[in-house]
Amino acid sequence: MPYRAPRGTVDILPEEQAYWRYIEQKVIHITQLYGYERIDNPVFEDAGLFVRSVGEGTDIVQKEMYTFTDRSGSPLTLRPEGTASVCRAYLEHGMDNLPQPVKLYYIAPIFRYERPQAGRYRQHHQFGYEAIGDDDPALDAEVIDMAWRFCHALGLGQLTLQLNSIGCRQCRPAYLAALKDYYAANGGNLCADCTTRLQRNPLRLLDCKQATCQPVADAAPRSLDHLCSPCAEHFGNLRRYLELLGLPLVLNHRLVRGLDYYTRTVFEVQPAVEGAQSTLGGGGRYDDLIAELGGRPTPAIGFATGIERLSLNLKRQKVAVPALPKPGVFIVYADEKSREEAVKLAAALRQAGVSAVQAFGVRSLKSQLRQANTLAIRYTVIIGEAELKTGTVVLRDMSTAEQKTVPISQLVSLLHAVNL
Ligand code: AMP
């Protein structure tokens, strides 16, 4: 076979779609409960938008973006995350003039050139939401609460909610200096990535997964101990609200997230049993991003989670999702003449809202019935010579093999009566 799906991408086959539909319906429900409206942004944007917002020194910008020039020579990037596009749209469409915060959500494909593994792809999909235009810690609490409730509404359990504050422009430089000093004094045998991070993106040192780097990262200075008083007050209030909401948060001083735009609150939902690779979703505040993109200073906070990752966890935790509806009726015909009737009947049933399919080509009755069985369709409607003459059809319940002859004029009401 000359072509396969590109490395790190997957086809979402029909048997997988029940999980997707289930997750999408939970998304629609929770976003409505918390007052979010949907936004769909383009799949590609100016490359500069992501470099500017995600940050020059991040893994995403350094190693993972799919950037290309189009025929006019403009550099474009396939969206490697959702927040930057939402903020760009917020500014472009003057949403800063609406009552704040503006609450938007998306379900969108995301592209990152990563090393593919279970639950990590080069194209995946994220459900994300952003609340833009308010710095009240009660909003942080609401955003975190929504993430937590969403995961539980899906039926997922054994989760932890991890929280940290990484400060702001005022207090972070001093913290980063303390972190660098510490690593310079204690980071004797850092991994190659951490050696680069120490120069380029010291906050990410804390996020390293290499075994050798764990003791030094565990004992590193904590951002919570270096917050300026407005950040400390914000964090204190946030914790109070989270307690009011009864959320079981775990403080994690090594939680820093992989994008530069975060300020103050950062949080993640993780499965209790696995490592950080399997993070279900994460988010945080990005109070400087809108100004960075040319707007007035506008605080904001958001969260994103991967649909594939959710689906994987639903399967691991054996959460049963509702099956997608199948056609209710398979129409079987005996010969050429009754086939004409089958074509008409299929159209009439669909007009009446009954989902109906039929076999095509010249097929024996037996083979058509076998097909209906394989497709697990509940009823077959059989049209033969005798039925044609009498204006009837045979209605067969495939689960019980019971069948009866019914006037064709009564078929729709009989099918409606069994909820088809
Ligand atoms: P991030 O933007 O890196 O915080 O990612 C948010 C969420 O998207 C993660 O917690 C995962 O659930 C999911 N995710 C991120 N990267 C990938 C990937 N390469 N493949 C599948 N899911 C991903």
Image (cartoon, helix red, strand yellow):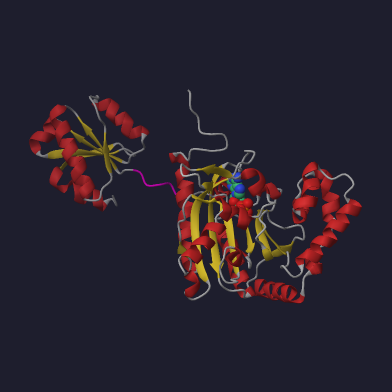
Query: On the rendered structure, is 402 left or right of 164?
Result: left
Residue 65, placed above or below residue 90: above
Query: On the rendered structure, is 14 left or right of 177?
Result: left
Residue 236, placed above or below residue 211: below
Q: Residue drawn 18% across and 37% down? A: 343
Magenta-colored segment: predominant secondary structure: loop
Residue 287 rendering spot, x and y as whole percentages: 63, 68
Q: Residue drawn 55% across and 64% down? A: 130
Foreground of the two, 265 or 320: 265
Foreground of the two, 262 or 128: 262
Range covered by the magenta-colored residues: 322-326
Residue farthest to the front? 72
Foreground of the two, 272 or 373: 272
Residue 97 rendering spot, x and y as whole percentages: 48, 74
Residue 269 rendering spot, x and y as whole percentages: 64, 57
Residue farthest to the left? 389
User: Would residue 405 be visible to someone looking at this image?
Assistant: no
Foreground of the two, 317 or 28: 28
Give residue 193's quadrant in the image: top right
Q: Residue drawn 49% across and 57% down? A: 106
Residue 358 rendering spot, x and y as whole percentages: 26, 35
Give residue 139's quadrant in the image: bottom right
Residue 405, magenta (yes or no): no
Q: How many marks?
A: 0
Residue 324, magenta (yes or no): yes
User: Would residue 16 be visible to someone looking at this image?
Assistant: yes
Residue 29, placed above or below residue 409: below
Residue 82, placed above or below residue 349: below
